[in-house]
Amino acid sequence: MSASVAAVDLGATSGRVMVGVVGPNTLQIQQIARFPNSPVRTPAGLQWNTMELYSRVLDGLRQAAQHGTQVSSVGVDSWGVDYGLLSGDRVLESPFHYRDERTARGVAAVHARVPHEALYRLNGLQYLPFNTLYQLAADDPAVLAIVDTALLIPDLMNFYLTGHRFAERTNASTTGLLNIATHEWDTELIDLLGLRRTMFPPLVGAGDELGELLPHVLDFTGLASDTKVLAVGSHDTASAVVATPMHEPDGAYISCGTWGLVGVETEKPILSDAARAANFTNEGGVDGRTRFLHNVMGLWLLSECVREWERDGKPVTMEHLIAEAASLQTEVPLVDANDPTFLARGDMPTRIAAWCTEHNLPAPQSRAEFVRCVIESLAAAFAEAVRSASTLSGQTVTRIHIVGGGALNTLLCQRIADRARLRVVAGPVEATAIGNVLIQGRALGAVSGTLESLRALVDASFSPTVYMPEGSA
């Protein structure tokens, strides 16, 4: 018996509502609605327009209700670290964007109390200046004083849908406030940072039921009154890894969208000094697995270049740019894709050119050269991160799975294969939404088994594209 479910998949640049049908021998997914997710610059800083985002989610769910098959449940995933602050049932202000400049002062405040080396032993997270604990340290104390609850973005959307407050563990693991050994809120660390324990809601796991839709949500969407809201791997990478067809521990993954998350799946966290020095993170995965990975800047570099080039009002076609970049016969410089210079929004081509000049490299001149520079730099960073993940984890890697939007970039996939000297298996593109659907389907009893069983269903349902290193058989 199959089940029809709605997957709400919110990314840092766009969101989708998908309808999936899942059963023992069935896995289908269809996009119902897609909408932009654009931050807004206010006098306070760079913030998310979460009310607009929620409005688009409701519109998508209404379309899902009209799709033709009854939707049994809804699951929400999104990016990590960002949060809304609630007092009563009211969100006090629009959530800040992780690229907002305020996070810098939060880093200094946290490290004055707990150095990163000690933090790593507690939470297992790589240093990223926008991790939630740094953001909270940068928030206005007067605002925090009246906060009842802090909800990460998918938890906030679930609150709007159900009225209930929970924190799903895979996304909570990105806060830096979840203890790596117990997988519970680290109350001692919370106290040490001067935060209140009561701000952090009860934790739930992927597959847990969160509640029923509120009456006004039912009225607006037309969904059936018994539609459940289920927790999924609410960190989008956690859902993407669920749907990455790795059957043996010899596969590495790259979940490639705005960010490139590069790593391996492990049974336990890796907290060695070498892992900390390499800035590898241990984030929570579904079924208690660990996502041992490194963040690379990702397709953000390309999208920001395109955004700058479109400022003259003329559309820029990514496919055309990539084709031109692929045909280049000249060498292009490599930039450090992880350099903080490239983190903020703004004129990316100018920053890339300035980085090259600062490092005594010839700067790209044409748009095709900029695109080829970005793709070569990402491929080099991804290949190096795979090698590091293998060395640090002790797991032999024989192939790389790339999922998400990056799986459509044929030049990027080929250059990763060439630089890593490994086979690259590209797809599925919609891995995040598929992983969301699979966890809902398992919670409803439409499918069963381990993550390996779910991945076998993915393998049987979607055909990947395989890239071999140039010059190999």
Image: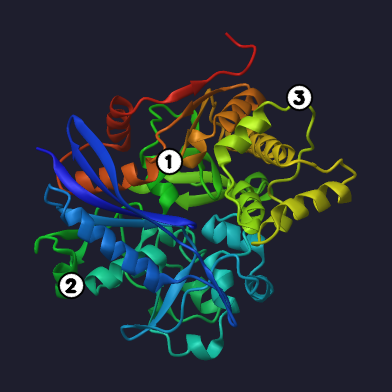
Q: Which mark is residue 348?
A: none
What secondary structure is found at the residue carrying circle 1? loop
Q: Nearer the viewer, mark 3 or mark 2?
A: 3
Q: Amino acid at mark 1?
A: Glu
Q: Position of residue 95 (x, y in %)?
A: 47, 74
Q: Which mark is residue 214?
A: 2
**Vertical placement of 27 versus 121: above or below?**
above
Q: Position of residue 376 (x, y in %)?
A: 69, 35
What secondary structure is found at the residue carrying circle 2? loop
Please give the residue where the numbered disc 3 appears in the rendered image: 329
Q: Nearer the viewer, mark 2 or mark 1?
A: 2
Q: Nearer the viewer, residue 48 or 127?
A: 48
Marks 3 and 2 in Cβ contact (< 8 Å): no
In which quadrant of the rendered view does residue 214 lie?
bottom left
Horizontal relation, residue 140 to residue 68: left or right: right
Q: Amino acid at mark 3?
A: Gln
Q: Is residue 230 visible?
A: no
Marks 2 and 1 in Cβ contact (< 8 Å): no
Q: Amino acid at mark 2?
A: Leu
Marks 1 and 3 in Cβ contact (< 8 Å): no
Q: Position of residue 183 (x, y in %)?
A: 40, 58
Q: Which mark is residue 267?
A: 1
What secondary structure is found at the residue carrying circle 3? loop
Which residue is at a point 76% across and 55% down the rendered structure image? 351
Q: Quadrant of the N terminus?
A: top left
Q: Distance from label 3 to label 2 (Cα)?
A: 59 Å
Q: Distance from label 1 to label 3 (Cα)?
A: 44 Å
Which residue is at a point 42% across and 37% down the rendered structure image? 429
Q: Nearer the viewer, mark 1 or mark 3?
A: 3
Q: Distance from label 2 to label 1 (Cα)?
A: 38 Å
Horizontal relation, residue 217 to residue 309: left or right: left
Q: How is the image coloured?
A: rainbow
